[in-house]
Amino acid sequence: MMRQYELVERVSSYNPNADEALLNKAYVYSMQKHGSQKRASGDPYFLHPLEVAGILTDLRLDDGTIAVGLLHDTIEDTDATRDEIDKLFGAEIGKLVEGLTKISQLDLISKRTKQAENLRKLLLAISDDVRVLIVKLADRLHNMRTLHFVPEHKRARIAQETIDIYAPLAERMGMQDIREELEGLSFKYVNPEAYDAITERLDEVRKRNKTLIEEIEGELQKTFAEKGLNAVVTGREKRAYSIFRKMQRQSIGFEQLSDIFGFRVLVDDIETCYQALGVVHTIWPSVPGKFKDYISTPKPNDYRSIHTTVIGPGRQRVELQIRTRQMHQFAEYGVAAHALYKDVSGKTKGGRSLGRLAKDSNAYAWLRQTVELLSSGDNAEEFLEHTKLELFQDQVFCFTPKGRLIALPRSAIPIDFAYAVHTGIGNTCVGCKINGAIMPLVTELANGDEVEIICSKAQTPPAAWESIVATGKARAAIRRATRDAVRAQYAGLGEQIVRNAFKRAQQEYSEERLKLALPRLSHPTIDDAFAAVGRGELPSRAVIEAVFPDYQDQRVAQSEGERGEGWFGLKHATAMKFRVPGSGARKRAEKKADKNGKSSIPIRGLAGNLPVSFAPEGGAVPGDRIVGIMTPGKGVTIYPIHSPALSQFDDSPDSWLDVRWDIDEENTERFPARIEVSVINEPGGLAEIAAVIAENDGNVENIRMEQQVSDFSEMVIDLSVWNINHLNRIIEQIRSKRSVSKAWRVN
């Protein structure tokens, strides 16, 4: 067990200004609180927070973070309280310890919905102060090192959680060594068969190439020295899990792996990195397509290095990573390394430094961007899917025309690029240029592409984009824009309904009065109230009554004789105006409405600005007398006035809307209709009918054959036509055919 003075010495070795009193107090407090508690291994529980603090000292973190490591389990596992820790160690340390306590209570691989919500909570907790994540990773690392003491039925679950969540988070934060160790420790519990097989094969390779690593190290070291380069070369085998992932990703066997051995070359400065690269490529041939320069183009987590693969001694492929010593510190410590190269003494002494410095890093920027998705209102399961997708996917690096670097997951397309630059650019994107050439928006991007997005203010993102983009940010923005567009449609429809309702009620519409009535309608804005009316959730009569509390909606009593008028004995209401042809009074009202065009809602079709659908089993076409039925959550459904289906709405007159066609002469939109044809059972009957429809510029959407008797069959044909005249012409010509017994329109 590490002694108190040993911990202080380890911190002082890299931070001479460390607060020794804080470290001593945290050490003693944690030991006293954990007291006689034992771990599953039988060791004193205090050994765990002490080991976590030791891992944090290996990362060379500030004394405040070390103190949090010592205290991280006190609130959860002892009688310590947040108030007590605040008083003894300060509110900042208390907040971090409490954040770690909340994270430890999350089950990140429980049922999918709970897992998704818990991942949200995890990312929100660590986004406020990245030290929470660093201490949690150190805590998880020590737990994984001692996982063999945990009951067997729990090991696989904990290992799966580690490999799914914590290892990718470590990688995103640039902490490569911790990521690799977490993956290696988890791998043997998550997939023991694969772990044993790969470990066995690595042992065989090691025996066959006992001296290969030493040979390559010596040859490189000697060559660099002869060229006057101060370089340190270290070699190692790839980790078992890294090999397993590569085999899975590329669908290859162990024998096809070409770069089991890797070497790091550490030099003094960037210029020497490129000199060393030239030396390596001079003595050994490079492998085409296996060169990556992360110095000129760093990864989003601040990782910088040159990667190259060469054919070394014995025709063995060897991967080399060439970097400066400072770059190596960043590669090992990730976001934590920012504290090593900035002033953390004096005025920034203690726990405040790292939290501030980490926010300057690109690695931490990814976390902030991910948390932005939390505010988009997406459901938790979609957030889980997108976050895991971005955690695991490899990346491509593209550029804007001004040279700004944009990192995206593999399989990303220009739409993802547009949203990565700015949500507004994504929402107005209509086209793109890749490396100067106009390309489709679904083109998969490659490393180094320069992408220019072409925008139009008239554009709104199609809902179909959601299924083709690769990033969570793009999907969230597209869904949000789609919701806003639908809401705007419902609000537009609702406003027309409300204005017409005020007119029919002979009340003056006033936006100011409506604003004052919003609390009674339980909606925060006028647009929200209009959208509720447009969706059928709020009756227009309720809006009038909220604005004019004394308003009475007077119904007209009907005589028995009057009940036969209209359709299906529908009850009449003064608040509604039904445009039914036939009776003199209604016909005069209808003509008046048509003259001023203001008493009814204009209907253009499915592609208009209103949330409109057409009746099932037959639809409606221009020229039909129509009525609109408001359906909660679906908008308006348009029925022909003679449709038998309208009888089901007899008892809900408030759902009826006065609507009219508003079709331009140059209309290019078709409308749905259904016909039935009784045809003689003989060859060529269907072809004859199809020919009539095609010759008359109709479009067949669907055909269903229903044989009634041996001599005749009935066809149900769904068409799309321009208007009622067009439909009637098709029906008349079908009737004229010799094989047709009869044809009629459904409805």
Image (tube, rainbow, N blue to C red):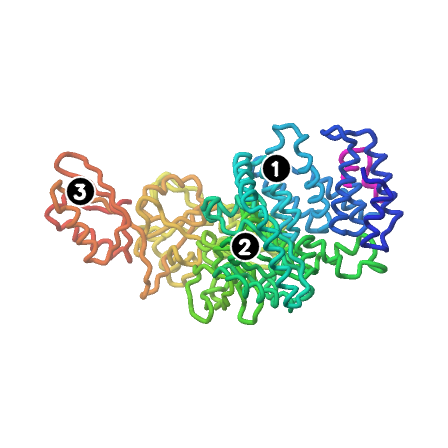
- In this picture, residue 622 sits left or right of residue 452: left
Mark 1 surroundings within 10 Å by alpha-carbon count, few (fewer than 14), some (14 through 19), many (20 or more):
many
Mark 2 surroundings within 10 Å by alpha-carbon count, few (fewer than 14), some (14 through 19), many (20 or more):
many
- In this picture, residue 607 sits left or right of residue 111: left
Question: Of the numbered discs in the image, which one, if any, rests on residue 159?
Answer: 1
Sequence-earlier tag: 2 or 1: 1
Using the image as rendered, state which of residue 357 and residue 432 is in the foreground. Answer: 357
Residue at screen point 85% across, 55% down: 16
Quadrant occupied by the N terminus = top right
Amino acid of disc 3: Ser
The furthest residue to the left: 738
Q: Position of residue 348 (x, y in %)?
A: 82, 58
- In this picture, residue 723 sits left or right of residue 360: left
Give the quadrant of residue 147. top right
Viewer-nearest of discs 3 and 1: 1
Q: Where is residue 120 in the image (x, y as percent from the top left)?
A: 63, 45
Using the image as rendered, state which of residue 526 and residue 120 is in the foreground. Answer: 120
Amino acid of disc 1: Ala
Q: Which SS does the magenta portion mostly show?
A: helix
Does the magenta run of residues contain 23? Answer: no
Q: Name the residue under label 2.
A: 318
Quadrant occupied by the C terminus = top left
SS assignment at label 1: helix
SS assignment at label 3: strand
For the magenta stretch, what is the residue range? Answer: 72-88
Using the image as rendered, state which of residue 683 and residue 634 is in the foreground. Answer: 683
The furthest residue to the right: 21
